[in-house]
Amino acid sequence: MAKKQRFRDTKQKRATPIDKVEKPTIPFASLGLKAKAFLTDIFMLLMPLFYLSIYVVFDGLEDVAKHRVEAWAYAIIPFLLLLTLFMLKDEGRTPGARSQGLKVIEFHTLEKPSLFSTVFRNLMLPFSMFIPIFWLIPFFRKEKQMLHDLLSATCVIVDPNPPKEKVLKSN
């Protein structure tokens, strides 16, 4: 028995079963929302760690001026660890992402990122942030992915089901 020839259907503009498959629409986060979430994470997590490194590890700003790289390392390494812990604990959300209603997912599976993806994404974050040429990447991509998202195969989306906040009842 002859196999049905699909090119005839296409030529005569008839629908085929392959044409009926719809891809899910992914609500990618805008650059503005991602920037707000990142700035929130910076001010909530990184700045307190940097102040701790200035005044606890070093003897003040004069000592930090001599050892700038070490001072930033004492702040950025715990910052990346905290981001990773928040993302693993809270379904791919950091405090900033939670405040903006965002979530990090794996690009191909649309699920919570794996441990490797989360750790690799956060290890690549400084390269993505501190090298200005990489800031241009999201402007040329439909998914608005930064370098660390591309390398770890993750993306930031607007969370369709944001977590419910617990409201304290006053009696």
Image: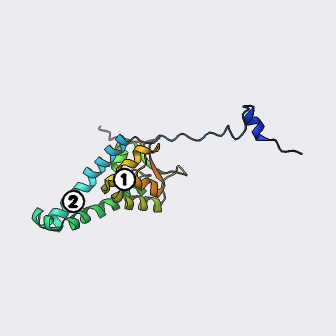
Name the element at disc 1: helix
- Residue 164: percent from the left, percent from the top? 41, 42
Estimate how packed mark 2 is, as few (under 14), some (14 to 19) or many (20 or more) residues with alpha carbons within 10 Å. many
The residue at 30%/64% (across/down) is 77
Sequence-wise first label, 2 or 1: 2
Three-letter amino acid code at the position of disc 1: Phe
In the rendered image, the quadrant that contains the N terminus is top right
Name the element at disc 2: helix
Three-letter amino acid code at the position of disc 2: Phe
Left or right of 155, for residue 33: left
- Residue 109: percent from the left, percent from the top? 55, 51
Q: Residue placed farthest to the top in the image?
A: 13
The residue wearing badge 1 is: 134
Q: Which is in the foreground here, disc 2 or disc 1?
A: 1
The residue at 47%/42% (across/down) is 142
Write down the quadrant of residue 102 in the picture. top left
Label 2 and label 1: CA atoms lie apart by: 24 Å
Left or right of 39, for residue 90: right
Colouring convention used in this rendered image of the protein: rainbow
Residue 136 appearing in the image: yes
The residue wearing badge 2 is: 50
